[in-house]
Image: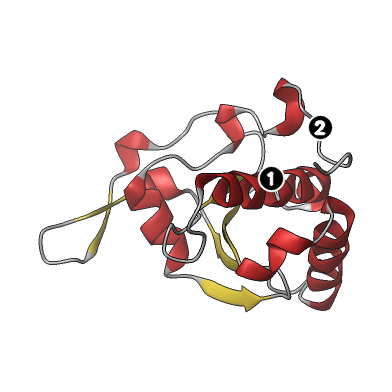
């Protein structure tokens, strides 16, 4: 077991700071793609709750559903059972990604949305390695995050 991972309730971002709708994940995934060693990131600026997908697959804007008091960026983590066969692997990948993004969270602009897809290489590393990987990505792509 990795001692770098916290085992209490603070190991995850609060629900108000997470993406949780399938349509929001799809909307963010249509944005810019950034590949790192351990995680693939999809990044998109804006408010995901102001859109909806119609039956033709086109985005429609819905101003009445905007989040009134958005306090920061929104983060979503998607883990594939095709890539990670066992639930323990999926959970570990999610935890490592979540801890790294939580540490990076204060640096991110408030209108940013991120969907993170952990890669299989994340299983054999410590949380500090994932954080360093994401910090390098952030420093290299600061124009994408603003």
**Marks 2 and 1, how far apart in space?**
11 Å
Residue denoted by label 2:
6
Quick one: SS at disc 1?
A: helix
Comparing labels 2 and 1, the label whose residue is closer to the camera:
2
Q: Which residue does the image show at 48% across and 48% down from the upper left? A: 47
Residue denoted by label 1:
98
Q: Quick one: quadrant of the C terminus?
A: bottom right
* Percent of width and height locating residue 76: 54, 48
> With 95 as the anchor, is 56 left or right in this view?
left
* Percent of width and height locating residue 43: 58, 65
* Label at residue 88: none
Q: Which residue does the image show at 55% across and 74% down from the upper left? A: 32
Quick one: SS at disc 2?
A: loop
> With 8 as the anchor, is 39 left or right in this view?
left
> With 65 as the anchor, is 1 left or right in this view?
right
Picture quadrant where residue 60 is located: bottom left
Placement of 12 over or under 141, stated as above or below: above
Picture quadrant where residue 120 is located: bottom right
Question: CB atoms at circles 2 and 1 under 8 Å apart?
Answer: no
* Percent of width and height locating residue 105: 76, 46
* Percent of width and height locating residue 140: 82, 78
Q: Quick one: quadrant of the N terminus?
A: top right
Q: Which residue does the image show at 49% across and 29% down from the upper left? A: 68
Q: Which of marks 2 and 1 is nearer the N terminus?
A: 2
Q: Can residue 23 be seen in this view?
A: yes
Q: How crowded is mark 2: few (under 14 residues within 10 Å), some or many (20 or more)?
A: few
Placement of 113 over or under 12, stated as above or below: below
Q: Which residue does the image show at 82% across and 68% down from the upper left? A: 133
């Amino acid at each position: 077991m990795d001692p770098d991972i916290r085992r209490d309730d603070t190991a995850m971002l609060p629900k108000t700071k997470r993406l949780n709708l399938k349509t929001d994940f799809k909307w963010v995934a249509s944005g810019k793609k950034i590949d790192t060693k351990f995680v693939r990131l999809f990044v998109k600026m804006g408010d995901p709750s102001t859109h909806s997908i119609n039956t033709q697959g086109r985005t429609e804007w819905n101003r009445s559903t905007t989040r009134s008091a958005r306090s920061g960026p929104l983060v979503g983590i998607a883990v594939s059972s095709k890539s990670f066969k066992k639930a323990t692997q999926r959970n570990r990948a999610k935890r490592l990604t979540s801890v790294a993004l939580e540490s990076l969270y204060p640096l991110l602009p408030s209108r940013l949305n991120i969907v993170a897809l952990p890669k299989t290489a994340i299983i054999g590393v410590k949380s500090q390695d994932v954080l360093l990987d994401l910090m390098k990505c952030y420093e290299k792509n600061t124009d994408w995050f603003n």
